[in-house]
Structure formats: C-alpha cells, structure tokens
Image (cartoon, grey):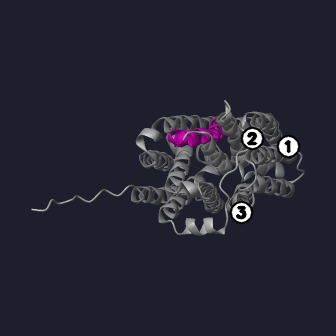
Amino acid sequence: MTRRFAPTSLMLGNFVTGCSVLAPAGMLSELSTALDVSIRTAGLLISFGALVLCIGSPLTAWLTSRIERRKLLTATLAVMALSNIASAFAPDYASLMIIRLIMLAIGVLYTPQAAGTVALIVPAEKRGSAIAYVFLGWSLATAVGLPLISFVASRYGWQAAYATIGAIGCLSVPLLAWRLPAGLVGAPVDLRTWVELGRNPAILVLLLITTLQMSGQFVVFTFLDPLLRRLTGAGPDAIGLVFALYGVFGFIGVVIATRIVDSWGAFKASLLFTVLVLAGVTGWSLSAGIYPLMALSVAVWGLGFASTNSMQQVRLVAAAPPLAPASVSLNTSVLYIGHGVGSAIGGLLYSRDLLYGAGYVSMAFLGLALTMVLLSGPRPKSAVVPAE
C-alpha cells in the first residue's frame, strides 16, 4: 500500500543525487583555483564520474534487482550523504576524485531504481506523471541546488558546498526510510533481460536519443561557469543567477510535463521539450558575449532540460513494461555516456579557446536528437481503400 508522501521522499532523494552528480559544474572555478588544477582538469570530475555512472548503472541494476527497494534506496542515499561529507575533508584533487568515483559507483543506483519503485506503488494510469514527479528532484537540484552550491562555494569555499549537500542528504535518508513502503521488489534482471532489450528497436532508438540529448547539453553545461566568466565577464552572483534561471525554469518544465504527459502522450511531450532545449542552446550560441540574451536563452533551455529525460523514462516504461527496471537503468547509463562525451568535447574546445564553438557543437548534437525524436514517433496508419 502506498504511504502518503512516498513519491515525495523518492523525489527528494533524487534532489540529493542530482546535487551530488552536478556539484562540480556549480563550482568549477573555485575547484580549479583551490586545488591548483586547470579548468579542464577540474571538469574531469564530471567526465570520469560519468564513466563510472555509465558502467555502473546496468551492472548495479543486475546485481541488486532482487534486493528489497526500501533497504536498497535508503542505503544508497546514506552512502551519497556520507561521501559528500568526506569530500569536504579531501586534502587534494586526487583524493576528491577517488571519493567522488566511489560515491557515484554506489549512487548510480538511485535514479533508475527510484523511477522503477514509484511505478510499483502508483496505479498504471498515473505512472507517467509519477515518474515525471520523482524526476522533479533533478530539476530542484538545478533550480535550488546549483545556485546554492555556487553561492556557498564562492563565499565559503568548495568544502562548505560539499558539506551542505551531505547535510541535506543526512536529512533525506530517515524521511525515505519512514515513508517508502516495505516489501517492494522489482522484476529480477538477468542476461535474458539484456538480450530482449538489445532486440527491441524502439528501446534502442530511445537510448540513442538520450545519448544525443545529454551529449549536446553537457558540451556547454559542464563549463557554463567559466564560459560565462570569459565571454561576458560575469562574476559569481551573475553566474549564480544564470544557474538559478536554468533550474527554476527546469522546475517549471517538469511541472508542465507532469500535467500534460498523461493527456498528450510522452511522444508529443518529448518533442516539445527537445525543441525547447534546442531553441535555448541556439539562442546561447547566437548571443554569445551578451549576458542578458545568454541568460534568457538558458531559461528557455532549462524548460526542457530535465523534462526531456523524464519523458524518455516514461517512453521506455511504456515501450516494454516488463523490461522497465533494466531499460530505465540503461537509460541512466547512456545519459551518463552523454555527460562524459559532452564534457570531454567541451573540455577540449575550452582548452583550445574555442569558446564560441561549444554552442554550435551542442546545436549539432541536439539537432540530431530532435531528428531521432521525430523518427521515433507513432507511424500514421495506412489508409484503407474500400473495394469497388
């Protein structure tokens, strides 16, 4: 039986997960200066983290598929909270990287298992909006978490930012343990499951869309802070405002998604939010160097950022409900492939001072993603010609 606020407790866990994954992007300049490494090297905290997340998502889905969900999710969230606190005491860059990789190797469990768990505790007709609601935690991580991380790091140091995430995580763990029903176990994941996924063309196309969407966005997003500093001369407060716009509009986008997905269908909603992301990145590219226009473009981009992926999860669950635990975890895996690919390309462009080119590379990836979304839509039914 669903306990009141169980989906909310799962959503707040996603907030902690999102902050843990995205934290370096909100304080890249502070990490670079304090740890005496280049911006590109600091960005590897995201790139290498994405590699661990990519490999870990399907692997942990297989290893933990028979574990009761409340125990699994609360333990995962506790590890993330304690790892963030440990990060605050890291003496150097290498130590911080090791702690981060260990944290993400465990934390990779949370988002796909939260999506699969909420699907077990809500009626089928509300599954789409429930999954989108749980993913709202990631939007809150960008709306509230990233500006908070940027603010704390710029004034009190990167250690204080990690400690803040850890403290929030420590508050979220008992709430999740209290509100999530006991006895929830998803369908077991075995080798046959992965074979079935590989033979499903619809799922493979959806996974490609996720990869393209995330690769395109993280070419710019990973280096949003230093790009704004160099292109516009923006200071910490102005950069924090852009992160806030990105997150607030991301929150609005997911709220809209939860309202329209059950009536519109996930395909139409996915198309809408992919167009918004592409429009925002296009605006960023064309207005590069003009702070107000770049900030406005980031707001448009934010409307689609989290919603595109929540719609991908809804589409994957609908495409093959029995395979949902595996397909959603694999979607998380390719999402982080996108993080890694985009961050690596963005780092290469930044290190070569191709600051304006990052936006156009991002546009190319997102244009391909939009094309694939269009191709993945429902096929029109052939007209039947009546016999004479």
Quadrant placement of the C terminus: bottom left
Q: Does dot 3 land on a helix, a strand or a loop? A: helix
Instruction: Classify 302 as above or below 99.
Output: above
Q: Judge whether 228 appears above or below 255 on screen.
A: below
Residue placed under numbered mark 2 in the picture: 182
Secondary structure mostly taken by the magenta-highlighted segment of the chain: helix
Say which label, 3 or 2, has the lower sequence index: 3
State the image quarter where residue 180 is shown: top right
Indicate the quadrant where residue 335 lies. bottom right
Amino acid type for the residue under numbered disc 3: Leu
Tell me which residue sits at (64%, 56%) in the image.
329
Residue 18 visible: yes
Q: Which residue is mark 3?
A: 59
Residue 348 belongs to the span the image colors magenta: no
Residue 365: % across, % down: 50, 59
Relative horizontal placement of residue 224, taking residue 79 as reference (left or right): left
Task: Check disc 1 and report the residue beneath it.
Answer: 85
Mark 3 surroundings within 10 Å by alpha-carbon count, few (fewer than 14), some (14 through 19), many (20 or more): some
Disc marking residue 109: none
CA distance separating discs 1 and 3: 26 Å
Q: Nearer the viewer, residue 139 or 322?
A: 322
